[in-house]
Image: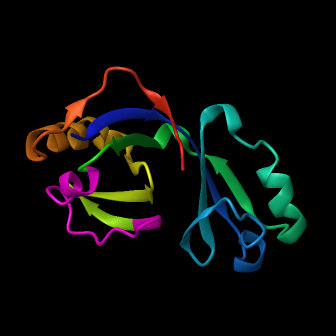
């Protein structure tokens, strides 16, 4: 039975040349010139801007953590539950973006489950849709740190 868990996260938006973004192996590419660095809050890297500026002096780096809400679907059946709220084809491990419960979202799939990033204004809505539409999903009371 899968669990839905509120997940604490640090999200840094990085806009730079594709070559500069290649120097951020931990980043999730959104577009050729845009990436997100998604980490647990305690591991947020304040040096990302300096690292990118060496490769692209015009790079823009912003902490956008407040703009995102993260939920994790964990446990056996997480992928089956996800199929009730999205038609996205999930990779075994990796990143995909698209419609989740009618909201644009970013999904990071891993061995332990799925991490969903949604715009903060839609966070409670997505939570409610998951609990309403995904049979067997229970919300865990204790939040957790982002894990990729």
The residue at the point 67 percent across, 31 percent down is 42
Which of 71 and 92 lies nearest the eye of the viewer? 92
Q: Position of residue 27 (x, y in %)?
A: 64, 61
Tell me which corner region of the image, top left, top right, bottom left or bottom right, holds residue 129. top left
In the image, taking residue 57 as reference, residue 110 lies left or right, namely left
In the image, taking residue 16 as reference, residue 6 lies left or right, namely left
Answer whether residue 102 is visible to the viewer in this image.
Answer: no
Give yes or no for residue 91 being in the magenta stretch.
yes
In the image, taking residue 48 as reference, residue 4 lies left or right, namely left
In the image, taking residue 9 as reference, residue 17 lies left or right, namely right
Give yes or no for residue 120 being in the magenta stretch.
no
The residue at the point 75 percent across, 64 percent down is 59
The residue at the point 44 percent across, 35 percent down is 7
Which of 53 and 101 lies nearest the eye of the viewer? 101
The quadrant the N terminus occupies is top left
The residue at the point 70 percent across, 54 percent down is 61
Q: Position of residue 111 (x, y in %)?
A: 45, 55
- What is the residue that sits farthest to the top in this orientation? 141
Which of 73 and 61 lies nearest the eye of the viewer? 73
Tell me which corner region of the image, top left, top right, bottom left or bottom right, holds residue 57. bottom right
Q: Which residues are magenta?
A: 78-96
């Amino acid at each position: 039975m899968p669990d839905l868990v509120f997940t604490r996260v640090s999200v840094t938006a990085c806009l730079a040349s594709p070559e500069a973004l290649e120097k951020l192996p931990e980043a999730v590419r959104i577009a050729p010139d845009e990436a997100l660095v998604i980490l647990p809050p305690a591991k947020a890297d304040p040096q990302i801007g300096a690292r990118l500026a060496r490769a692209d002096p015009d790079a823009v780096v912003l902490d956008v953590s407040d703009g995102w809400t993260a939920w994790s679907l964990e446990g056996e059946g997480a992928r089956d539950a996800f199929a009730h709220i999205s038609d996205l084809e999930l990779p075994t491990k990796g990143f995909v973006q698209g419609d989740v419960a009618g909201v644009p979202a970013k999904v990071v799939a891993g061995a332990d489950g799925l991490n969903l990033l949604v715009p903060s204004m839609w966070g409670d809505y997505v939570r409610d849709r998951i609990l309403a539409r995904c049979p067997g999903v229970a919300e865990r009371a204790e939040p957790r740190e982002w894990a990729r």
